Amino acid sequence: MNLYINLQPKSYEFGYSVKDAQSGNDYDRKESSDGNVVRGEYRVHLPDGRTQIVTYHADWQTGFHADVRYEGQAKYPEPTYNNKQGGYNYNAPAPSDFSGSLTGFHGNQGYKPTTAYGPPGYH
């Protein structure tokens, strides 16, 4: 049985793009490698209207390096308020129609706390 596995780095190239107006998804990516260095870029359309672009390269000696930049200006919606008065609205409780007397509790029924303690118990 031959268990030889070729672990030599291989060159490759790939990419994809998504642009879906209904969902708002708009991004793409491309990447390539010569077997030693990986290079790539991806773009994402952000909810604030800008496009984030990340360009990167990586190798075994220096690791991963990325450059992140943005195109366009961020646009934020105007704040909306649902109450022109603002603040907290206080509603007074409704008046009670209770007219009876309180029953059930008749004060302290003779409880007297202990002020002297016995010797400690041993277990």
Image: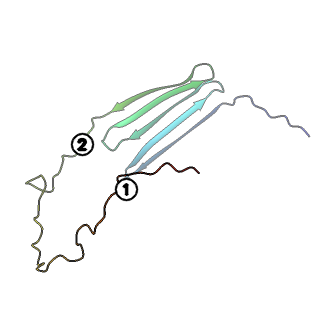
Left or right of residue 7: residue 58: left
Q: Residue furthest bottom?
A: 100
Q: What x and y, as percent, mark residue 34?
A: 63, 26
Tell me, for residue 40, which label it has, or none: none
Identify the element where label 1 is drawn: loop
Which quarter of the figure is the N terminus placed in? top right
Report crowding for label 2: few under 14, some 14 to 19, many 20 or more residues within 10 A (C-alpha).
few
Identify the element where label 2 is drawn: loop
Residue nearest the observer in this picture, 43 or 13 = 43
Number of numbered markers: 2
Q: Residue furthest left?
A: 85
User: Which of the 4 quarters of the picture holds residue 102?
Assistant: bottom left
Q: State if disc 1 and disc 2 touch (CB < 8 Å).
A: no
Residue nearest the observer in this picture, 67 or 123 = 123
Tell me, for residue 22, which label it has, or none: 1
Residue at the (66%, 27%) spot, across then down:
35
Amino acid type of the residue that numbered disc 1 sits on in the rendered structure: Gln
Residue nearest the observer in this picture, 15 or 84 = 84
In the displayed structure, would residue 33 be above or below residue 28? above
Residue nearest the observer in this picture, 83 or 94 = 94
Report crowding for label 1: few under 14, some 14 to 19, many 20 or more residues within 10 A (C-alpha).
few
Q: What x and y, as percent, mark residue 28?
A: 47, 41
Q: Residue furthest top?
A: 61
Amino acid type of the residue that numbered disc 2 sits on in the rendered structure: Tyr
Left or right of residue 86: residue 121: right
Residue at the (11%, 58%) spot, across then down:
89
Nearer the observer: mark 2 or 1; the answer is 2
Q: What x and y, as percent, mark residue 32?
A: 58, 31
* Disc 2 to disc 1, C-alpha distance: 20 Å
In the displayed structure, would residue 99 be above or below residue 22? below
- What residue sits right under mark 2 in the picture? 76
